[in-house]
Image (cartoon, rainbow, N blue to C red):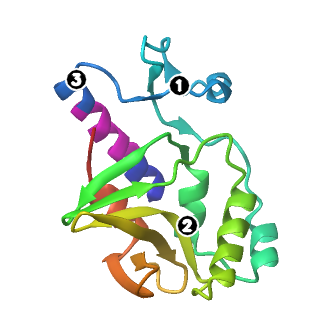
Amino acid sequence: MIENAVKEYYKKLDKLWSDKRKTHPLIPYIEKIEPYNMYIGPKNQSDYVEWIIQKNSKVVDFSKIEKAIEIELKNEIKQYFSSYWFLNMTGLYENIIVSFTPITPLVDISVFIRERFNIAKEQNRNTDKIEIGIVEIDHDDGYLLLFDNSTGYVEAYDADKKLYQIVAKSLEALIAEMEPRC
């Protein structure tokens, strides 16, 4: 399950930060996040704060989203958007640096998915492929990270060349197997 993959990723991330920097993961402080209990302690003198993942407590009505975009979403992407809030999920997966767009209490998932659908449509991209982050391959960070809703694969998309490249066979595998970075 995606929920377990995200939870395990965060455990690895937290251990990495603890081992290397003697702290929990740090992120630039955003005042609007404060009420959601994702921060551990006060911000430091550089305006960074330690953070933790938080169970997503907002109910997402995927049927309305699916009706708006006229696509039935796979359970894996639904779980991804509704399991946990996270402020940073970046890691190394098979020599590719993967950076997921943060899913926070401030993100309206319905708006997020519809906007990405509309952008894909405007750019004549496959609208079954939902943008969920960015990817760096061979020191080039110009790739989009996409979840292919028709196959379940996670792909990198080179907008200049209009080429798709499979990154992982599933979103769960990608999150579970990627090694965090700090």
Spot occupied by residue 119 in the image (x, y as percentages of width and height): 66, 74
Q: Earlier in the sequence, mark 1 or mark 3?
A: 3
Quadrant in which residue 67 is drawn = bottom right
Spot occupied by residue 122 in the image (x, y as percentages of width and height): 69, 82
Q: What's under tag 2, amino acid-wise?
A: Ile
Q: Which residue is mark 3?
A: 21
Q: Which mark is residue 29?
A: 1
Magenta region, main secondary structure: helix
| Quarter the N terminus occupies | bottom left
Left or right of 116 on screen, residue 7: left
Q: What's under tag 3, amino acid-wise?
A: Arg
Q: Which mark is residue 77?
A: 2
Q: CA distance from mark 1 to mark 3?
A: 18 Å
Spot occupied by residue 153 in the image (x, y as percentages of width and height): 41, 78
Quadrant in which residue 56 is drawn = top right
Q: Which mark is residue 152?
A: none
Q: What secondary structure is found at the residue carrying circle 2?
A: helix
Residue 83 versus residue 142 in the image, above or below: above
Residue range in magenta is: 7-16
Spot occupied by residue 166 in the image (x, y as percentages of width and height): 34, 81
Q: Nearer the viewer, residue 34 or 172?
A: 34
Is residue 11 located in the magenta-colored stretch of the structure? yes
Residue with the most extreme front position:
160
| Quarter the C terminus occupies | top left
Left or right of 88 on screen, residue 16: left
Q: Image point 59% across, 83% down: which residue?
A: 128
Quadrant in which residue 12 is drawn = top left
Is residue 116 located in the magenta-colored stretch of the structure? no
Left or right of 47 on screen, residue 75: right
Q: Image point 21% across, 68% down: which residue?
A: 138
